[in-house]
Amino acid sequence: MIGYVTIGTRDMEKAKAFYAELLADLGASVLMDIGRIAFIGTAMDQPMLSVCIPYDENDPQPGNGNMIAINPGSKEAVDKLYAKALDLGATSEGEPGQRIEDIFYGAYIRDLDGNKIAFYQFA
């Protein structure tokens, strides 16, 4: 149902490099780059993450309560993406762990622009 989700950035080159590297093990890459916006994913007909310089060229503002959740396919992959994100310069918003009474395993980070990202696996 979701085609793509867009998050704002102050630095396109850093954002593209961060997400392309972070999601490379999931088969993702920059699929389309048209200057102020770039789409990262596995195929154009699959859900994608896009990064952009806001149209009004004002500073991007991470939303309060907004979060992008990425399911990499296993608890081990959650751990790996969380560690990789931190290595790439993200900050922790919650270490990997079991949540919601053994139903949900998750980890949380803020990207280079402060956008909140979750990596998760349902148990």
Image: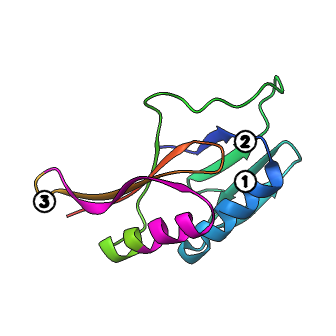
Crowding at dot 1, Cα within 10 Å, few <14 / some 14-19 / many 20+, comes out as many
> Can you say which quadrant of the picture contains the C terminus?
bottom left
Q: Looking at this rendering, what residue extends furthest in the right direction?
A: 35
Which residue is label 1 attached to?
15
Where disc 2 sits, the SS reads loop
Q: CA distance from mark 3 to mark 1?
A: 33 Å
Say if residue 7 shows up in the picture.
yes
Residue at position x 77%, y 56% in the image: 14
For residue 81: magenta? yes
Crowding at dot 2, Cα within 10 Å, few <14 / some 14-19 / many 20+, comes out as many
Label placed on residue 9: 2
| Position in image of residue 29 (x %, y %) | 69, 67
Q: CA distance from mark 1 to mark 2?
A: 7 Å
Which residue is label 3 attached to?
102
- On screen, residue 19 versus residue 122, left or right, reads right
| Position in image of residue 42 (x %, y %) | 62, 66
Residue at position x 82%, y 22% in the image: 56
Sequence-first tag of 3 and 1: 1
Say if residue 121 shows up in the picture.
no
For residue 84: magenta? yes
| Position in image of residue 106 (x %, y %) | 32, 58
Mark 2 residue type:
Thr
> Answer yes or no: do the residues labelled 3 and 1 have beta carbons within 8 Å?
no
Q: Is residue 37 above or below residue 121?
A: above
Residue at position x 57%, y 42% in the image: 115
Mark 1 residue type:
Ala
- On screen, residue 38 versus residue 83, left or right, reads right
Q: Is residue 6 above or below residue 15?
A: above
In the rendered structure, which segment of residues is drawn in magenta?
80-100
